[in-house]
């Protein structure tokens, strides 16, 4: 029984300026796609949001041809400082329309407005600002005096951070002088299409950016098309492997940012209250639908009981519900298919003998919901410790020595990220050098910045996004 | 085994916990065995809690609760009996035009004005708190500081706000700080003891955590951030660490101790944010004037203005609330 219940504080959905229908963006113009008209739904209550006319095979041809014309024409010959101006313009427009984009993102994706407002949208703008600054300085980035772009880039992005992933992909590609055909995820096309509006209003030459809202078949068509010089993909390892097989021998460049099963390692000398926050942020941020989520907690045995008790107490204060309520911490799962996958893997966790715990929380009746969940008594052999769940589910394992922590953390097919919690600086450095993960966070987790390269080892993919290193993925080097 | 057990602290009643202070090295070992505070993380958590949006019914409850938690304070060299009487009238009935506005928790004055306050508040629910122990610096002999406390208690103070010896704390003489608190508690009688850590002078959040535990084990009923004479005074990360301390102290001793934030809190918005922190960090039990206070002078008027706005829909100017 609570004595200080927060009254509902919903952000108005009118701010999203939702239109009844959205069109694809090809060669500088919006048009109905030649594919099917589908309805995109609000995962929080399963109501339709808008109709989207999806791209068909003919649109892929047109988009790639337009991108080629732009690359061979105005964009390819434009000096970097001029390209930079366009990127600055896009960045400012994202900021100006930030509130609209945040509400739209929460409606289409199901993530809490607190996150779309404070993380997704500001970071998307930051990526454009950062790369705008690089556009005229590529000669000083360490890739030779005059590095050349690759050409026409096909970019396929996931549904977990729809606008942010579009920004991660488009900003460096344009800064380096490439042209783009972007395929957003089928369940979350709306903010990418508003970004197309922003790009149109920024007066980018036609064909520099094309946005093909569509299903998987169009992604596949992009991957297989001869007119595409590079594929940049963020998504599942399964699709990543398909892309790798398809482009093998074609000379196409490729960068893949795939799944993860990150270890968040807490030593007995860690700042425990902050570690609890980091664990929560690591696995419940964006409902755990994050490729670098800290989905495996490795805690030193001597503090395991205390830490789990603190974690459970903290989870009881998480607010699950309406994504548009400003006080919501955990929103809806993006789709029925994803919810099914999470349920299947958590059921496997129970079957294999791990102990399941969730805080008491009422889930809405309609929509796709999953309560924050912790599994204790997990062993390395359990599926929930090996497979990416991509949901708000934490597997807790214990270790006794630093060597054992390294061994368990690296014992995975993935290698995207890891976290280390200790007050001992030398231990942080020693762990970071031994962990096979592209990103190692020390005494924090899930922190992103455009200046910092991001990417994986092993089945988490290759290529880096962000920072100076990220430019290498869009230059012919 | 828990971290606190590592540090030498087993589940026990508050008085028994004092065994960790059996000698200097034992107390030091205990304080250094407490888990560290990562400053970046603590600041991030405090900032995250500040984004909660408290509206309508929740805000109305929070504003009234915050009024009931105010220690209405005047600590100026220029204080007079007349000023204190006027403050007491306001403490008992903050809004003369609205009898539903609750009284504040206490008034807080220097020891020589306690008697005036006690007389002025007779028959009300408002307590009388007195700063003592050579407030605000505490730079006097223990005997002088205790004399100060005895004066205030004899004059009828129900709460004593003492300062710790920050010099001794920063020099690592923890047992001296501890013994001072124990001695002060002993002369308080039935008066509640609030221990002012002066966190602005302790500088690090690790020190705030250590000083909080030291004061709680020594028997302080409340831990209090600041005298109000030093900047920075109460800040969100400091409040966070102190709320964690009383929460964890309850975990080992089953004893509920309070937190008082003092200095620099002037607006309802800040007060409501702190109540969110109290709820989400310490727990609902601390949403009570017996366990959480704001030491403030101008905060009350802003709370009253917000209260008026919530009940009538109109925001009155500063001339519609009394100046003291």
Image: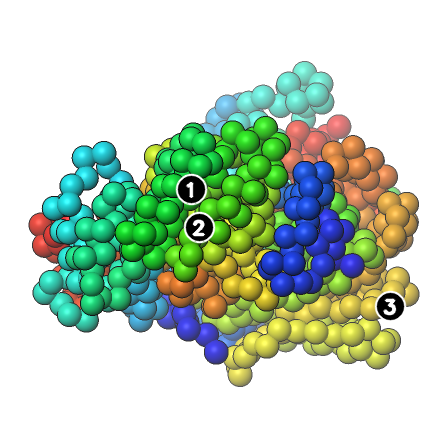
Q: Residues within 10 Å of mark 2 (few under 14, many from 20)?
A: some
Rendered location of residue A173, percent (x, y): 61, 37
Q: What residue did someone put label 1 on?
A: B146
Task: Tell me if B132 is positioned left or right of B110 in this view.
Answer: right
Q: Which-is-in-front pick, marks 3 and 1? A: 1
Q: Residue A291 got which mark?
A: none
Q: Are marks 3 and 1 on the same chain?
A: no
Q: Quadrant of the C terminus of chain A?
A: top right
Pick whichever, A114 or A42, lies toward us: A114
User: Decide: marks 2, 1 in contact (CB < 8 A)?
Assistant: yes
Q: Residues within 10 Å of mark 3 (few under 14, many from 20)?
A: some
Taking the spot 75% from the left edge, 63% from the top edge, the residue there is A305
Taking the spot 55% from the left edge, 39% from the top edge, the residue there is B177
Q: Quadrant of residue B314?
A: bottom left
Q: Quadrant of residue A57?
A: bottom right
Q: Which-is-in-front pick, marks 2 and 3? A: 2
Q: Are marks 2 and 3 on the same chain?
A: no
Which is nearer the N-term, disc 2 or disc 1?
Answer: 1
Which chain does tag 1 point to?
Answer: B
Residue at disc 1, secondary structure: helix
Q: What residue did someone put label 2 on?
A: B187
Q: Is residue B319 above or below residue A398?
A: above
Residue at disc 2, secondary structure: helix
Taking the spot 70% from the left edge, 21% from the top edge, the residue there is A142
Task: Tell me if A430 is positioned left or right of B153 in this view.
Answer: right
Pick whichever, A477 or A91, lies toward us: A91
Task: Tell me if B21 is positioned left or right of A251 in this view.
Answer: left
The residues bearing labels 2 and 1 have C-alpha atoms spaced at a distance of 7 Å
Q: What residue did someone put label 3 on?
A: A382
Residue at disc 3, secondary structure: loop
């Amino acid at each position: 029984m609570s004595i200080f219940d927060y009254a509902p504080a919903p952000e108005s959905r009118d701010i999203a300026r939702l239109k009844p229908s959205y069109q694809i963006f090809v060669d500088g113009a919006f048009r109905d796609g030649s594919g099917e008209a589908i309805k995109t739904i609000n995962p929080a209550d399963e109501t339709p949001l808008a109709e989207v006319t999806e791209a068909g095979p003919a649109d892929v041809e047109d988009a790639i041809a337009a991108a080629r014309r732009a690359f061979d024409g105005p964009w390819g010959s434009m000096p970097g400082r001029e390209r930079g101006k366009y990127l600055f313009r896009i960045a400012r427009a994202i900021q100006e329309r930030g509130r609209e984009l945040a509400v739209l993102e929460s409606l289409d994706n199901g993530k809490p407005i607190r996150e779309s407002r404070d993380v997704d949208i500001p970071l998307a703008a930051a990526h454009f600002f950062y790369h705008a600054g690089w556009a005229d300085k590529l000669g000083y980035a360490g890739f030779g005096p005059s590095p050349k772009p690759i050409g026409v880039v096909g970019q396929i992005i996931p549904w977990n951070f729809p606008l942010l992933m579009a920004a991660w992909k488009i900003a460096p590609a344009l800064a380096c002088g490439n042209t783009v055909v972007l395929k957003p995820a089928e369940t979350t096309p709306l903010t990418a299409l508003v970004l197309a509006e922003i790009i149109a209003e920024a007066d980018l030459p036609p064909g520099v950016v094309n946005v093909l809202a569509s299903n998987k078949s169009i992604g596949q068509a992009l991957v297989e098309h001869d007119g595409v010089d590079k594929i940049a993909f963020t998504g599942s390892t399964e699709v990543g492997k398909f892309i790798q097989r398809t482009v093998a021998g074609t000379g196409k460049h490729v960068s893949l940012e795939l799944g993860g099963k990150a270890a968040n390692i807490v030593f007995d000398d860690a700042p425990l209250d902050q570690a609890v926050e980091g664990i929560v942020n690591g696995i419940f941020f964006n409902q755990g639908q994050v490729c670098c989520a800290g989905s495996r907690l490795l805690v030193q045995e001597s503090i395991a009981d205390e830490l789990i008790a603190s974690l459970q107490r903290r989870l009881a204060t998480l607010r699950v519900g309406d994504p548009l309520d400003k006080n919501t911490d955990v929103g809806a799962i993006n789709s029925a298919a994803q919810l099914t996958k999470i349920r299947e893997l958590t059921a496997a966790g129970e079957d294999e003998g791990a102990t399941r715990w969730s805080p008491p929380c009422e889930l809405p009746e309609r929509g796709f919901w999953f309560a924050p969940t912790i599994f204790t008594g997990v062993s390395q052999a359990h599926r929930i410790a090996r497979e990416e769940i991509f949901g708000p589910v934490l597997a807790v394992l214990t270790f006794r020595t630093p060597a054992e922590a390294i061994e368990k953390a690296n014992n995975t097919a993935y290698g995207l990220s890891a976290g280390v919690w200790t007050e001992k600086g030398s231990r942080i450095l020693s762990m970071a050098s031994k962990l096979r993960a592209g990103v190692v966070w020390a005494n924090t987790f899930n922190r992103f910045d455009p200046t910092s390269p991001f990417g994986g080892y092993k089945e988490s993919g290759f290529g880096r996004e962000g920072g100076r290193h990220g430019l290498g993925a869009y230059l012919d080097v | 085994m828990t971290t606190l057990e590592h540090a030498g602290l087993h589940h026990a009643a508050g008085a028994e916990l004092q065994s960790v202070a059996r000698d200097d090295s034992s107390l030091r070992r205990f304080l250094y065995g407490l888990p560290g505070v990562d400053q970046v993380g603590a600041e991030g958590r405090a900032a995250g809690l500040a984004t909660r949006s408290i509206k309508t019914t929740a805000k109305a409850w929070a504003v009234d609760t915050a009024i009931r938690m105010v220690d209405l304070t005047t600590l100026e060299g220029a204080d007079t009996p007349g000023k204190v009487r006027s403050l007491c009238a306001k403490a008992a009935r903050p809004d003369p035009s609205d009898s539903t506005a609750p009284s504040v928790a206490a008034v807080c004055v220097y020891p020589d004005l306690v008697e005036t306050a006690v007389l002025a508040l007779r028959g009300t629910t408002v307590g009388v708190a007195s700063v003592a122990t050579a407030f605000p610096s505490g730079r006097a002999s223990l005997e002088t500081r205790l004399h100060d406390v005895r004066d205030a208690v004899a004059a009828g103070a129900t709460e004593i706000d003492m300062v710790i010896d920050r010099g001794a704390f920063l020099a690592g003489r923890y047992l001296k700080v501890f013994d001072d608190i124990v001695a002060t508690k002993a002369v308080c009688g039935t008066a509640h003891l609030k221990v002012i850590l002066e966190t602005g002078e302790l500088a690090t959040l690790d020190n705030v955590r250590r000083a909080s535990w030291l004061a709680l084990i020594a028997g302080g009923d409340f831990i209090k951030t600041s005298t109000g004479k030093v900047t920075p005074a109460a800040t969100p990360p400091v409040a966070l660490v102190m709320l964690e301390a009383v929460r964890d102290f309850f975990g080992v001793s089953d004893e509920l101790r309070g937190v008082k934030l003092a200095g620099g809190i002037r607006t309802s918005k800040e007060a409501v944010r702190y109540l969110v922190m109290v709820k989400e960090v310490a727990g609902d039990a601390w949403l009570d004037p017996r366990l959480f206070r704001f030491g403030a002078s101008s905060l009350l008027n802003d709370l009253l203005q917000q209260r008026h706005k919530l009940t009538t829909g109109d925001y009155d100017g500063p001339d519609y609330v009394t100046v003291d």
